[in-house]
Amino acid sequence: MLQSKHTRRLSWIAIGTATAAFAAFWSASLAQSAGGPFTDAQVRAGRTAYAASCAGCHQANLAGAGEQPALAGAGFMSAWGRRTTKELYDDIRAQMPYGRGGSLDAATYQNIVAFILMANGARAGSKAFDGTETIRISSIANGQVPADVATPRRAGGGDEGGAGGRAPTMALGQTLVGNIKNYAPVSDAMLVHPDPKDWLIYRGNYQAWSHSALKQVSDANVDQLQLRWSWAMNEGGENATGPTIHDGIMFLANTSNTVQALDAKTGELLWENRLGPLATRAYSALRSLAVYEDKVYINATDARLYALDAKTGKVEWKTDIAEPGKGFNETGGLIVAHGKVIVGLTLCRGQMPHCYISAYDARTGKQAWKFTTIAAPGTPGGDTWGDVPDDMRAGGETWIAGTYDPDLNITYWGTAQSKPWMQASRRSGTASTLYANSTLALDADTGQLKWYYSHAPGETFDLDEVFERVLIDHGAQKTLMTIGKAGILWKLDRVTGKFLDAKQTVFQNVYSGINKKTGQLIFRPDVLAQKTNSWISACPSAAGGHDWPPTSYDPGNDLIIIPLNQSCNMMLGHDVKQHTGVVQPEGEERLFFMPGTDGNMGRLAAYRTSTMEPVWSFQQRSSFLTGVLSTDGNLSFVGDYDRVFSAVDTKTGKTLWTVRLPTVVQGNPVTYEADGKQYIAITTGLGGGSPFSKPSSMLGELHHPDHGHAVYVFALPDKVTGKVN
Amino acid sequence: MLCAAGVAKAAEQKFDTRLTAVAYDGAMRANVQGDGRVTATLDGNKLTVSGRFMALPSAATNARLYSGPGIGVPGAPLLDLQLSGQMDGSLSGSFTLNGKQLAALRQGHVYVQINSQKAPEGNLWGWLLPEHAFPGANVPEKGHGFLPQLDVPGNWVEK
């Protein structure tokens, strides 16, 4: 039946192609004589509107970046050439700007479409575009990008050379110099054994547990939590951060690469340094900063590493992680281990060099080592890309900070999938395309590869395995646990990299099995038979399964608590020419709700790590968009797309407390103690990639303001804890 | 007779699904909205299907059972359902399934799809999966709750 339908479809395509060829000839002739279905005035207005609302993600030259597709050139024509001007208009109007579909007036959307058509070689005519014209785009545009579009005048200031977008208009530089007295430098020993009063590391400790031994706030009194203070953060860009706390000071990676120190008890600003560049929507969420000795470290979104004086906020040193102006990017935060600042790198799309993990002397900023995450031809693993030329080997980004085992002196990192997304586009079959979608174990002093584990050789649906590596010991056995977008919870031996176990946590249909001994996944047969320009289904969608909102490990209960997403998609991979240049994901996506979930996108689940046994789970309509924080008070805190921040009973999953915040709760909750009182801090934020954009598209009945980046800090009332001075 | 009826009842299998929008992008979104629910009973090889739909953006034109190579993987039309109503309405059907169709149903590969005037290649769909109680939003279940992983072979790692 499938074949006959497919054959019928091919017949229709053949007829359609002939018809389209005639239509293209006719339309092209029309375009030559009368121009396209839009005017010069619309193009001019559209250029301005595009710069204001679109360029931040799709770039001023419409080249796209990351998950934001190209809107001009061959990539655009692959996706849109066969579709109509009305479909383009409807698509943009329904979904754009990112997370704010339908928020512009109709004329502005029409003007933006006119500009995009012009940017693909279509000529303006005398009739204005009103959104109803069903003209095949390839009949009026050829993907030839005019020079003034391909190389626009730089607006300046924004990430990645994009126009300002929604970036704030504020001056850069240090606006408040601090004068913090008696600051206690952070030692290696303090990082190895963090004081529960502090939150010294992105995920709470080197092992990424996101767990606190504090228990003043507990399942017995959490219903009395109340807001103690809040702090508005910069608007613009993406916000998905988590504060770092030391010695009663909250260090905050604000958007636009602004670093702030706040009194963690009162919210008073102690110092501020606006490092810049200003944020736009695209890839500007800094998930963390780091503290060590007397410095604060931050890897700014333009791939520049700064060390600031923790007491004053002044820049002590700075160094380029990657060559400026090449589009390299940082979002994942960083760790400090054994005196070295270790950072990843993102948006490496075939331009050389490839992505790498690099380490810098914490005192001087001098680079100590670099490990490239794409294997070049002739190097170990280089043959895992088949015949793909070196400058077409893309992906392997490290957009989540690694973890560290001080006893083994090994740092563990996950890597992103290879690009283009789909096997058929990439032309690398089921080869493992090292070191994409792998766990890397690197010597923290030298960067030497101790071992790697390739989780998903041949991965083809944008299902990253890049997220946190959680280090858990079971007696003498040292394990590493991680979960990627496929929703498979992995357990490895972190000394050797040997596969130990795996567990599905959400429905998935990409893999039909797994080899029990090696962990090798077995693809669904029709996935292996994929072709370019054909739709193929995948559950979960590229929003994950699990995505960047990280897990928490509660050691007392041996539970890992996992935020999960439930959605599926159809994907279509483009034909990609094997040419030198920037490699894009080259795929299209159509979303749908995951079967068997009753339309619930969010799922929170707890698994016992010793046995991999599922202990509890619950579902809800809204996706979770924060990491989980667990505490010895038998509480797990988590926030969601529908503005709800909640605490659940870690042992049972029962919701014990909720609060509705002004906009999307996104980031990483942390807890700390100051003057005898336990505080819980969480951020609200917009943007953040697939986990944010997918529910924006699918959960139309859930609304949130398009602003409101902030930090909220909760504690129990003084009558419960005693008065705090 | 009573005993026989009881045995027959016990052999029945119940399936259900919520109908939600087919896979869509922004250009399609306006035409693929709506909601619905379908239940099905399998008694031996006889399948009885009934359901309701609502709030389609355009009038429903037909409804069918389809079968694909996996849960959540679209495929080809299998059997026609009877349809009444336009933007809101109901669907039903009674069928005798052959062995291949039975296997597909039991593996979760059969889905209901409603097509409409503005979405002739699909407006709503939902995979028929074993009836399962959904405890409600934010209500925890022991274990991992319902995971419709019916078609993975036994070599998947499970404890």
Image (spheres, coloured by chain):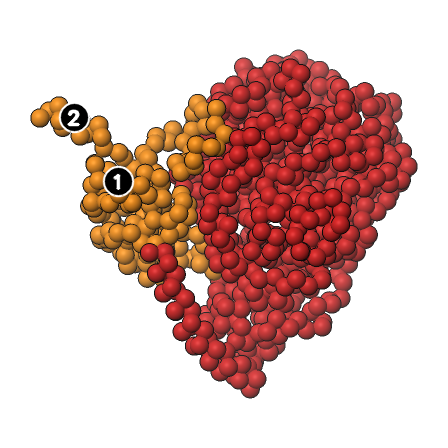
Give me the disc on residue B6.
2
Secondary structure of the residue carrying numbered label 1: strand
Residue sitting at x 57%, y 84%: A32
In the image: residue A251, left or right of residue A11: right
Residue type at mark 2: give it.
Gly
User: Mark 1 Cα within 10 Å, few/some/many (few <14, many 20+)?
Assistant: many
Chain of the residue under label 2: B
State how far apart marks 2 and 1 are (Cα): 19 Å
Residue A54 screen position, x and y as percent: 63, 59
Tell me if residue A616 can be seen.
no
Residue A662 screen position, x and y as percent: 57, 39
**Mark 2–mark 1 CB contact (< 8 Å):** no
Residue sitting at x 57%, y 62%: A575
Give me the disc on residue B40.
1
In the rendered image, the vertical position of residue A709 relative to residue A629, given as above or below: below
Which quarter of the picture shows residue A436? top right
The quadrant of the rendering that contains the C terminus of chain A is: top right
The shade of chain A is red
Q: Give the residue at the far left of this rendering.
A: B1
Secondary structure of the residue carrying numbered label 2: helix
Q: Give the residue at the far bottom of this rendering.
A: A33
Give me the disc on residue A358.
none
Which quarter of the picture shows residue A551? top right
Residue A278 screen position, x and y as percent: 75, 50
Judging by colour alone, the chain drawn in orange in this rendered image is B
